[in-house]
Structures are given as structure tokens and as C-alpha cells.
Image (tube, rainbow, N blue to C red):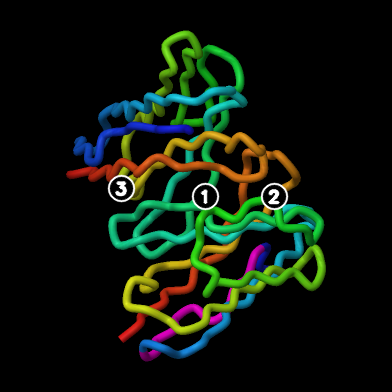
Amino acid sequence: GQSLEQPSEVTAVEGAIVQINCTYQTSGFYGLSWYQQHDGGAPTFLSYNALDGLEETGRFSSFLSRSDSYGYLLLQELQMKDSASYFCALPSNSGYALNFGKGTSLLVTP
Amino acid sequence: DTAVSQTPKYLVTQMGNDKSIKCEQNLGHDTMYWYKQDSKKFLKIMFSYNNKELIINETVPNRFSPKSPDKAHLNLHINSLELGDSAVYFCASSHPGNEKLFFGSGTQLSVL
């Protein structure tokens, strides 16, 4: 089977940098994705890492270390609108679904 | 144009009733999904269809029956609703095997 572990809650101050970690276990690895979900909203795709290293998209970056079965999402210059839940996800063994972690609730305070 | 649209947005019903949720995507994707999100925000895959064929059925009670009349539509019918079915149900679509899923806005189901 697969498992994904991420912290349940993180709090950070506006303008700061925050890192949300995700550790995973899977028999075959096909990439780690990150999604954002605001309260009452739908999950939206943020980033995807298939290979080791850092992928940058504006204020958000995602890192992957396949040897450590570990990844993180880095949010810089935090804004109040970044308060949301963030999910890491792995493709299922069939490749026809994503299995999500339990999500990290990020609260950005003034 | 909404990429993935699902209706209704809210569904309040009594235990034992039967209800349906409809989903349509205009993205030209071959793969569609139903996810259930519980009160703790855990997103769990229920079904996955590719080109109208069922690929994944994740230990979902057989009271839940998906139907895909064509590649752009994936509906969910639920029989004999139970209290534990209360959740937000999300439809999503993607290209086959692609990690970028596009989600609908969700259907908040409340079973009383």
C-alpha cells in the first residue's frame, strides 16, 4: 500500500517563509504532487516533482528527495490568502488516481 | 466556461433516500474521478474511470454506483443514504495518468 505523512497544522506570519513536509511510502514511485484547498473550495494543483530537486513556481517551490522518500512545499513571502490546506499526493499503483495525504492546515497571521 | 462542473452544490436529504450527483467536464480529458472528503478534510478516491471504463473502485459500498454515459460525464448515484455518507463529494478529471487533476466545486451532502 501507500502512505503519506504531513503535519496537520502549521502557523506562520505574513511575509515569512514556511515549509510543509511530506514523507511517503510507496512500492513504485511516479512523482509527488501538491494541491492547495481553501475552505469551502476545491483542491487546485500547485506542483509536481518526478525527479529529485527543487521546482519553483513563483512564490511556491516544491522539493523532492526520492532516496529519503521525502518532499516539501516551500511558500515564500506569505500572504493572508495563502491560509489554506495543502495536500501532498502520490499516483496510485494503477496510475489512474491520486492518493492524498491528510493535509496540512496553514494559518497565516498578521 | 467552468472546466469541471458538478450539480447540485448542496444536497440535504433524509436517511434511506436515493440521490444523484452529476458531473461534466469540458476539458477533453479521458479520465474522471469521484473523491469523498470527510469532515477531517481527508480526500479519498472512490472511483476512477478512463474512457468510460471503470478503473478503480476503492472498497466503496455498492450503494454507490457511478455511471459514465460518455467521456465528458461521470455521475454518482447513491442508494439508501446513511448518516455516514455525509461529506463533500468532488468530481475531477485529468488526462490519463496525469498528476494534474481538475476538480469540480464539490457537492456538500448532508444526510439527516
Q: Main secondary structure of the magenta part?
A: strand
Mark number, residue B94: 2
Mark number, residue A83: 3
Residue numbers of the magenta segment: B4-14
Residue assigned mark 1 = A44
Indicate whether B64 appears above or below B92. below
Indicate whether B23 appears above or below A97. below
Q: Nearer the viewer, mark 3 or mark 1?
A: 1
Q: Between residues B74 and A36, which one lies in front from this camera angle?
A: B74
Name the chain under label 2.
Answer: B
Residues marked 3 and 1 touching at CB (< 8 Å) = no
Q: Residue at x 42, y 26 (%)?
A: A24
Assess disc 3: are there few (<14), some (14-19) or many (≥20) residues with their C-alpha within 10 Å of its C-alpha. Answer: many
What kind of element bears circle 3? Answer: loop
Residue type at tag 2? Ser
Q: Position of residue A42 (x, y in %)?
A: 48, 59
Indicate whether B109 appears above or below A43. below
Residue type at tag 3? Ser
Does label 3 or label 1 sit earlier along the sequence? 1
Q: Residue at x 30, y 62 (%)?
A: B39
Q: Is residue B7 magenta?
A: yes
Assess disc 1: are there few (<14), some (14-19) or many (≥20) residues with their C-alpha within 10 Å of its C-alpha. Answer: some
Mark number, residue A6: none
Q: Position of residue B10 (x, y in %)?
A: 44, 81
